[in-house]
Image (tube, rainbow, N blue to C red):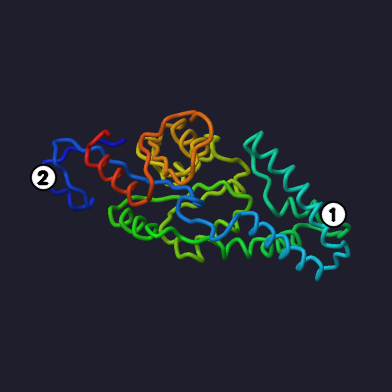
Amino acid sequence: MLIRLCFTKSYEPLGIACYGFVIALFRAIFLDLGDTLVHLDRPWEDIFHANLQQLYNYVTTQGLKLESQKFAKTFVKQFNAASDQSNLRKIEIPMEEIISKVLTKSGLQHQGMELPTNAMIEFFKPEIEAWQVYPDTIETLSALERQGYAMGIISNAKSDYAVHAILQRRNLNGFFRTILSSAALRIRKPRPEIFRQALSSLGVNASDAIFVGDSMEADVAGSKNVGMRSIHLFRKPVEGMPLVNPDARVESLSEALGVITSWNNGHAD
């Protein structure tokens, strides 16, 4: 965290007011994506089914002969195995690699990753359409941008392509100077490496940054463990005892903006 002396009531270049002699200044805001900036417009189970049907329809045009129920069973088995590994080891197995194994086990031979990558893009089409922005997302990001913060995304996701596609479709990508997914780095939050990579990409120290996210483990614990200040966006009930206390807990992005403004005006609480 930088400490700047402020001798005037208004510190116009930063767009913030200074009512004391010293102001604590944060330089960067990092945010989670799913259930922080955007939300699904229907239950996840329905979207997963639509994704899988989209995938099956595509691979049948590429020569797959296996009937749909057997293909679905093979896919779910490989998907769950990859998810179990991800949760246990905090790694990410990208969706195109999962699909590659599914195609091989389903009898569709292929060389290289061109077919699995194209199939992955087809798989995520329904889901990309289903992600919608929260009502205060654009307003909050615009306010943070006007105040001069560098902003970044750190998202746990099985597809780097999908993360970028969601941001682009909802006109959010222009707000961010760095967009990191677990699929691209093959590691998941809360591992410290993904946070350190994000900080490095913006050229800021952990003490200069704030993280906003909805997961106590991935977002709050992960960011605090590298020295960032954390804001827990309380979207859903928290299961079990929290591993770490956030620096603030809010129920909306606009409320998070108020907390950030308060901190940057030198108020610790």
Between tags 1 and 2, which lies in front? 1
User: What is the x, y in percent for residue 59?
Assistant: 79, 65
Give the residue at x 45% y 46%: 235
Q: Which residue is mark 1?
A: 104
- Judging depth in this view, the residue of 130 and 156 nearest the camera is 130
Give the mark nearer the N terminus: 1 vs 2: 2
Secondary structure under tag 1 reads helix
Amino acid at pointer 1: Thr
Task: Tell me which corner region of the image, top left, top right, bottom left or bottom right, holds residue 245.
Answer: top left
- Judging depth in this view, the residue of 176 and 235 nearest the camera is 235
Vertical order, 16 against 124 (above or below):
above
User: What is the x, y in percent for residue 31?
Assistant: 44, 48
Q: Which residue is mark 2?
A: 8
User: What is the x, y in percent for residue 171?
Assistant: 45, 65
Q: Is residue 18 left or right of residue 80?
A: left
Secondary structure under tag 2 reads loop
